[in-house]
Image (cartoon, rainbow, N blue to C red):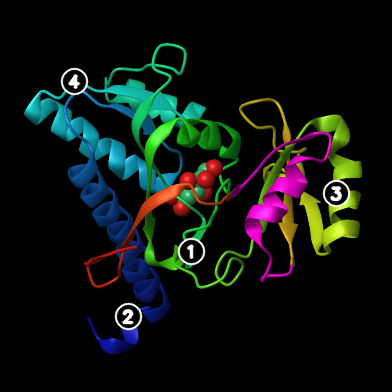
Amino acid sequence: PRVSSINFSRLRSAICDMSLEDAKRIAAYKAVDEYIKDGMVIGVGSGSTVVYAVDRIAERTKNENLKLQCIPTSFQARQLIVKHKLNLSDLEICPAIDVCIDGADEVDKNMTLIKGGGGCLLQEKIVASCANKMIIIADYTKNSRQLGDQYKKGIPIEVVPMAYAPIKHQIERQFGGELGLRMAIAKAGPVVTDNGNFILDWKNYKQDYDWAEINKSITLIPGVVETGLFVGMAKKVYFGLADGSVKEQ
Ligand code: 5RP
């Protein structure tokens, strides 16, 4: 085409979208290939990157006749497991998980994570806590020095609905920043999690906190169910890069 007929902005965004999806896929495939072995009980995380991991698990299950038990971390994860005809299990039947593969919204230099962009933080944390190894898969935009450098939507905090206002005020008073009730599309009402709770997203927080301490203090507030801060839980992170390589942390 003549140069004047090319829409450069659309072309650039098409290329960027493609490389972001590629970055997710290569990270997911590498993690699955390096960690998933026959006979394992695996935790299946949530989000768009995990979709590629489940694709790869399904492909390998078929080709290598793997016998796996899959524990979902959300309704979405459950649907992925069912769609691919993998063995769906739960923590009652399989309380000990070998490997949990999940995404993240941000990963700092200490492998502290922000999770819960998709609202699945509670079940993700429960499943990860039962896993021998939690492996994170992410594209390069999630790689950060300090929490808050990259992910601007805030730290999700799952709360019992009746307590959202006092929790918001207490955290703002005690730690600063602002908490907003996560709303559904078109602000039709609050987002309700798989567990029937609300989510507060905490923005403009101080970035140099001791996240283990903050996590402890926030979870002690009555009505807080869980935070999207995952401290000391990730064993390894695979970042898919724009150049087609995978960076391991
Ligand atoms: C959902 C999550 C996801 O793992 C996180 O939001 C990353 O998602 P994606 O892979 O779509 O970027 O924590 O609650």
Query: Is residue 210 rendered to the left or right of residue 135?
Result: right
Q: CA distance from mark 4 to mark 2?
A: 50 Å
Helix, strand or loop at disc 4?
loop
Q: Earlier in the sequence, mark 3 or mark 1?
A: 1
Q: Using the rendered image of the protein, determine whether residue 155 is visible from the camera's viewpoint.
A: yes
User: Is residue 200 visible in this depiction of the protein?
Assistant: no
Label 1 or label 2, whichever lies nearer to me, is 1
- Residue 106 in the image: x percent, y percent? 51, 60
Q: Earlier in the sequence, mark 3 or mark 4?
A: 4
Q: Is 210 rendered above or below residue 29?
A: below
* Marks 4 and 1 close (CB-CB < 8 Å): no
- What residue type is disc 3 on? Lys
Indicate the position of residue 157 as horizontal and vertical percent values.
70, 45
The image shows residue 137 at horizontal and vertical percentages of 36, 52
Which residue lies under the disc numbered 4? 67
Q: Which residue is mark 3?
A: 168
- In front of the other: label 4 or label 2? 4
Question: What is the CA distance from the residue labelled 3 to the residue labelled 4?
Answer: 45 Å
Upstream in sequence: badge 4 or badge 1: 4
Q: Residue at x 44, y 67 (%)?
A: 143
Which class describes the residues within 10 Å of circle 1: few (<14), some (14-19), or many (20+)?
some
Q: Is residue 87 left or right of residue 75?
A: left
Residue at coordinates 65% horizontally, 25% vertically from top-left?
195
- The residue at which mark 2 appears reads as 6
Q: Are marks 3 and 2 in contact (CB under 8 Å)?
A: no
Q: Earlier along the polypeptide chain: callout 4 or callout 2? A: 2
Q: Secondary structure at mark 2?
A: loop
- What's the magenta region? 206-229
Q: Extreme bottom residue here?
A: 3
Question: What kind of residue is marked 4?
Answer: Lys
